[in-house]
Amino acid sequence: MGDRWEGGCSCGHVRYRLTSEPLFTHCCHCLNCQRQTGSAFVINLLVEADRLELLTGEPTAVDVPRDDGSAQRIFRCPTCQVALFSEYGRPEVKFVRAGTLDDPAQASPDVHIFTKSKRDWFVLPESVPAFEIYYDQHELWPPASLERLEAVLR
Ligand SMILES: [Zn+2]
Ligand SMILES: [Zn+2]
């Protein structure tokens, strides 16, 4: 893999590496993600928890309320507080924030979701599927990723 999927926080305390390609890469335009990032969207690399290897440091888990009443567990560097990855209910799959990669250009979205709250000035690329809210992963994910997901959720 080299260090293509290696990243960390701003102060260098927490470093991580994905030991596989991501299962799938989301670009999420929902209002929760906009608020959390202070930006127009987040790019999340979905990967099994056991394929997200911590090289240094121990992120702190913070439960953040979402608009639908659920909570999202965000893992932050305890020193500089940069958010590195999160969980949406299931701890078996981590959502790694692609902007924390050493080379964020390695990540490109496989799907755009929650485009109903997308900013007007962001023009969706025609080459990538986009959904007003969410999608059926069985219709979009490569078979190998579906197999990997089933293996960890079993
Ligand atoms: Zn840090
Ligand atoms: Zn979102």
Image (cartoon, rainbow, N blue to C red):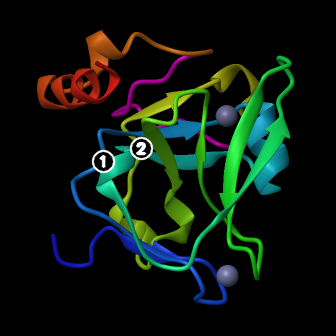
Name the magenta segment's main secondary structure.
loop
Q: Residue at x 71, y 19 (%)?
A: 116
Task: Residue 38: give x, y in percent of width and height.
Answer: 82, 56
Q: Residue at x 80, y 49 (%)?
A: 36
Residue 125 location, quadrant = top left
Range shown magenta: 121-132
Task: Residue 78: give x, y in percent of width and height.
Answer: 74, 74
Q: Residue at x 66, y 89 (%)?
A: 11
**Which amino acid type is shown beneath numbered disc 2?**
Pro
Separation of marks 2 and 1 at Cα, in angstroms? 11 Å
Residue 1 location, quadrant = bottom left
State the residue in front, 148 or 100: 148
> Nearer the N terminus, badge 2 or badge 1?
1
**Residue indicated by mark 2:** 109
Q: Residue at x 40, y 25 (%)?
A: 129
Left or right, residue 23 beside residue 49: left
**Residue indicated by mark 1:** 22
Ligand 2 placement by image quarter: top right
Quadrant of the image for the C terminus?
Answer: top left
Disc 1: CA contacts within 10 A as few (<14), some (14-19) or many (>=20): many
Disc 2: CA contacts within 10 A as few (<14), some (14-19) or many (>=20): some
